[in-house]
Structure formats: structure tokens, C-alpha cells
Amino acid sequence: MYESERPLLVRRLSRRRLIALDAAVAVLYALLTTMMSGGDAPALPACAAAVATGLPLAARRPWPVPVFAVVFATSTLSLCLDLVWDSYAAAAYALYTVALTEPRRRWIPTSLIGGLSALVILGGAVAGPDGWHSRRAAAFVLGLAVLGASWALGRAVRERRAHADRAARQLADRAVGDERLRIARELHDVVAHSMSLIAVKAGVAVHVAEARPEEALDALRVIETTSRGSLAEMRHLLGVLRAGSVPDTDPVSAPDLAPSPGLDGLTALAERAAMAGVRVELDVRAGDLPEGVALSAYRIVQEAITNVVKHAAPARCSVRVEADGHRMRIEVADDGPGVRVLPGGAAPGEGHGLVGMRERVMMYGGDFAAGPRPDGGFAVSADFPYDPA
């Protein structure tokens, strides 16, 4: 929402407008106190005191501490000379800005000051004018209570704003962390699958290059096709990430945003796995799915097949995907060796692939399991709910 579209009462004013508002308050205060200062006080000194107390308020935002010092001094002098009786209203108006802008000092008991000020103001309201032995003392004590209340209010607003800023920063940091995790997960799924196929076929080409050059040539074709597809998918992912900074009105520089991969891409995934020696049997029973659910299901199956290619090829692999409109169930099992040997000697379950699959399932509050099967091979299962809307 643009600034001009916000309601007037909740619109954030610029600093220049706030200073103009303070100037209007300063002039209004000087006029009102001048008209209200009657009685025994000489007209000219009372008018001068009202102007000297009120006009500095126009500069309370640029110079909060000097303005408060000047206004407090002139208010005290006016009270002592019986010129203007404002109960330190102008000084409280200036002190609020000081409390709002000055750094916090632990030795100032703000809560105690606010509580005592509230008690004094409440007691003065209950006692009334007749409850004070001296009118001047009453004005002085009540003025100090007003100052204390203004200080406590300014500090409370400052703390609330600081808390809101911290909460906003934490929310932004959390959003950045989640986005980084999503990007890392997507890049891992894209790169790991393609590089696994390329590595397998490159090894085949090296071993049969001299004895069977035609088979080596086929392996190189698979490497070329896989690498081109991987580059295209990475360009699509990077284009989506840059989409927020590309103007909608620029059709030339806007990226070509192809749909995210879904369950309809599992057939091509199985064909690429077959090139690396893994025969995949697909059993997909799912209707229309939300884009995020379809992408998560595709990535889980892709990572599971990638693990089969890396650790069990040549092997057979069965993939079962079932969605009933409320829950997604995925099972991927192979007949290769049940023990997975990860790069660097890591134990099963420590690889980024299984971690990424588990994170995708946990994002929906589902269940994930992966491990060797009793009758041999390795199995991955995922079960998570989703909203069909």
C-alpha cells in the first residue's frame, strides 16, 4: 500500500511535517497561555514568559535536550514569579521527545517514576484545590508528576518501538534463512541428480572407450542431454529468484518462468535413471495437486532415485506415489545393497539428500523414514497431509 493510500490518522508523517506540527503547537501554546495569564501578573512580562516557554517547542525534535532545558527553566521562573501557571505542560511536551530519543540509562528508575507520578496526579485530583496548603507548592508538585508521567510514557513508547523493530528483524532473518534453505534444497536436488547420472555415464565411457567406442559415444550423448537439462532447470530456478527485481513492464528482460516440475515429470525422470542403469517402475495415483505439494513430491522421488543411481546402480527401483486429496504417500524401494556408503565415509542418514527429503516432509507436518529393507535393498517412505485448496 502506498503512503498516499493509507488513512490520514494512520499515515506516517514525514519529519518536516512533524516539525511543522510542533511549530503549530508552540504558537498555540503561546497564544493560549498569554490569554489565560491574567490576575495580578503584569501583562507584558506574562506575555514574554509565555512566548519564551512556548516557542522553543517548535525545535524539540532537532534539539530535544536543549529545548527541554530552556522550557523547564522558563517554566520554573514563571512559576516562581507568578507569571504563567501551566504545571510544566510545555516542559512535559519537550521531555517526551527526550525520553523517546535519548539512549536508555539503567540508573534511571523509569517504572518507579511513572508509578509515583500516577499516584501524585491521582491524589491531587482526589484532594482538589482545597487540599493543598499552598497553591504554588501544589502547582510545583503536580508539575513534577506531569513531567514524570511524560518521561515514563516516552520510555514506554521507545521500548515498544524497539521491541517491534527487534521482532521485525527476527522475522526478516527467519524469512531469509528459510529462503536460503529452500534455494539450497532446490539447487541440491537439481545438481545432485544430474551430476550423479553424468558421473555414472562418464565412468562407463572411460571403461569402454577403446573396446566399445559406440557405447562410449552413447554415454557421452547421455552426458550432453543431462547437462543441458540441468542447466535449463538451474536457469529456471535462478530466473524465479530474480523475478522480484525485474519490472513487470519489461518483457525483454523478464525471465521465462516455466512451471515448476510436478508428478508429470516423473516419466522423464525414470527415463534418465534408466540411462544410468536403474530401471524405474512408476505407480502414480494422484489427481490435481497444489503446485507446492507436486514440487515436493517430485523432489522427494528425484532425490530417492538419485541415491539409487549413486549407491545401487545397476538396480531395479519401484516408485509408488498416491494422493487422495488430503494426504500424500510416497514409497521408493530398490533391490540394491541395503547399506549406503556416502561420500567422505559418512554414515547413512548424514547426507544432504536424506536431510532435504526429511525437511520437505516435516514442512507439511508428515512422517519420513529411510533405511535398509529386511529382504534386501533400501527404502524411502514419506507420508504428509496437505490442503487441496
Image (spheres, grey):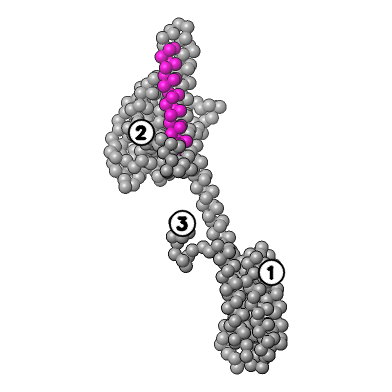
| Quadrant in which residue 69 is drawn | bottom right
Amino acid tagged 1: Val
Question: Is tag 2's residue or tag 1's residue first in the polypeptide sequence?
Answer: 1
Residue 232: where, in percent of width, then height? 43, 29
Residue type at mark 2: give it.
Glu
- Residue density around tag 3, few if under 14, some if 14–19, many if 20 or more, within 10 Å: few
**Circle 2 or circle 1, nearest the eye:** 1
- The residue under the point 53% across, 64% down is 13
Kindly report the secondary structure that dominates the magenta region of the rendered protein: helix
- Viewed as shown, does residue 11 lie left or right of 79? left
In the rendered image, which residue does mark 1 sit on?
Answer: 65
Whether pointer 2 and pointer 1 mark residues with C-beta atoms closer than 8 Å, the reply is no
Q: Earlier in the sequence, mark 2 or mark 3?
A: 3
SS for callout 1: helix
Task: Specify the label residue 2 is tagged with.
Answer: 3
For the point 43% across and 24% down, the residue is 228
Name the residue at 30% across, 30% down: 283
How far across and how far down the image is residue 212, in percent?
Answer: 43, 7
* Distance between the alpha carbons at the discs numbered 2 and 1: 69 Å
Asked whether residue 181 appears in the rendered view, the answer is: yes
Disc 3 is placed on an element classified as loop
Q: Which residues are magenta?
A: 216-240
What residue is shown with label 2?
331
Query: Left or right: where does residue 97 sit relative to residue 365?
Result: right
- Answer above or below: position of 279 versus 283: above
Which quadrant is the N terminus positioned in?
Answer: bottom left
